[in-house]
Image (spheres, helix red, strand yellow):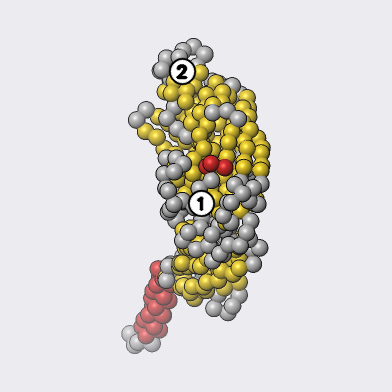
């Protein structure tokens, strides 16, 4: 199963007869929300449902042999009781969008990032009553021989059925997840580079879209922080924006970021600079720059045309004024 992440917002799933659309994002407030339209077996109309997962992610910095435990919550804001099965999978990322892929344990025999076997929960299923919160306890045991660096898993909640008051349960073909990130202490390779930093060479108007792609060749995930700065031909800063803070997984995986900078009315040559840092101590640099032009040529052409027409009109009037009748 693949769950896709977006830049902002919450986890949203829409389920209708014959169509499933899924989108996952980690929200700033530390919650993720599932909403859906589920066709009921005993009813003609669909019932809207909303499930909030908290927290949507569990980041851990741990030592080999360390133990952790905690509580996960599922808030059911719908009018029906929902039964979830709970399964723990290994998690990998292979694209440049940060899309988690959940794999059963052992699917990749040489997956050094696997962590599903480190996590347990107190129940394989969970009934969450309507308009109430269900809780699930998790337990983490990091192996004593765990290799330093990143290890990843997903606690996946599959809504098995909806307990409808006036009929039998209706099955739901959908899954939600809490993403689990481990960074095991010990010496690791920390290496990242800007694979791409680009802008359209010429634009008629701003804002201008900057595309940044950062590759992580290290042993653990990184979350670069920094700014995008745009200066004009005189070196004056005309725009500044913080980069999106998103995890980039290890093993040569890249993450693509897009930001629009500047305002509509821009004129001339500009330079955009990326100044960012990453790493366990957030002290390793990521630097890049790109030049681009912005020129509203259609308006400029119109203005030039009007000026030329005015000059020609003036010369015509002046010539006729001094011509003998």
Q: Nearer the viewer, residue 305 or 18?
A: 18
Name the residue at 59% across, 78% down: 235
Quadrant in the picture for the C terminus: bottom left
Quadrant in the picture for the N terminus: top left
For disc 1, the marked residue is 113
Q: Can residue 245 be seen in this view?
A: no
Left or right of residue 19: residue 88: right
Q: Where is residue 21 in the image (x, y as percent from the top left)?
A: 41, 37
Quadrant of residue 30 in the image?
A: top right
Left or right of residue 238: residue 96: left
Name the residue at 56% across, 69% down: 286
For disc 2, the marked residue is 169
Name the residue at 61% across, 75% down: 236
Q: Nearer the viewer, residue 32 or 201?
A: 32
Question: Eyeballing the image, is 145 above or below 71?
Answer: below
Name the outermost residue toward the left: 325
Few, some or many residues within 10 Å of mark 2 (<14, 14–19, 20+): some
Image disc number at residue 28: none
Quadrant of residue 69 in the image?
A: top right
Question: Eyeballing the image, is 218 above or below 5?
Answer: below
Name the residue at 41% across, 44% down: 107
Residues at marks 2 and 1, CA–CA distance in whole angstroms: 38 Å
Q: Which of 187 and 261 is in front in this view?
A: 187
Q: Position of residue 116 (x, y in %)?
A: 52, 42
Q: Position of residue 171 (x, y in %)?
A: 43, 23
């Amino acid at each position: 199963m693949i769950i896709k992440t977006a830049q902002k917002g919450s986890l949203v799933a829409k389920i209708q007869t014959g169509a499933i659309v899924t989108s996952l994002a980690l929200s700033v407030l530390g919650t993720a929300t599932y909403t859906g339209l589920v066709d009921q077996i005993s009813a003609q109309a669909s019932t809207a449902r909303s499930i909030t997962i908290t927290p949507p992610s569990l980041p851990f910095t741990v030592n080999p042999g360390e133990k952790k435990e905690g509580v996960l919550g599922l808030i059911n804001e719908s009018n029906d009781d929902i039964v979830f099965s709970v399964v723990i999978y290994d998690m990998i990322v292979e694209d440049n969008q940060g899309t988690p892929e959940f794999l059963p344990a052992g699917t990749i025999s040489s997956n050094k990032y696997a962590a599903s076997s480190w996590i347990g929960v107190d129940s394989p299923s969970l009934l969450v009553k309507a308009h109430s919160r269900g809780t699930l306890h998790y337990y983490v045991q990091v192996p004593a021989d765990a290799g330093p660096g990143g290890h990843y898993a997903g606690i996946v909640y599959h809504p098995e059925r909806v307990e409808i008051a006036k009929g039998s349960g209706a099955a739901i073909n959908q899954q939600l997840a809490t993403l689990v990130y481990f960074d095991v202490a010990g010496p690791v390779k920390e290496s990242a580079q800007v694979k791409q930093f680009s802008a359209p060479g010429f634009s008629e108007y701003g804002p201008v879209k900057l595309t940044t792609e950062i590759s992580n060749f290290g042993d653990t995930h990184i979350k670069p922080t920094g700014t995008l700065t745009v200066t004009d031909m005189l070196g004056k800063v005309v725009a500044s924006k913080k980069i999106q803070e998103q995890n980039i997984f290890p093993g040569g995986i890249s993450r693509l970021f897009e930001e629009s900078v500047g305002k509509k009315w821009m004129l001339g040559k500009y330079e955009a600079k990326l100044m960012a840092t990453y790493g366990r101590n957030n002290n390793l640099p990521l630097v890049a720059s790109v030049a681009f032009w912005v020129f509203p040529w259609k308006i400029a052409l119109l203005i030039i045309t009007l000026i030329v027409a005015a000059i020609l009109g003036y010369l015509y009037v002046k010539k006729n004024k001094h011509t003998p009748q």
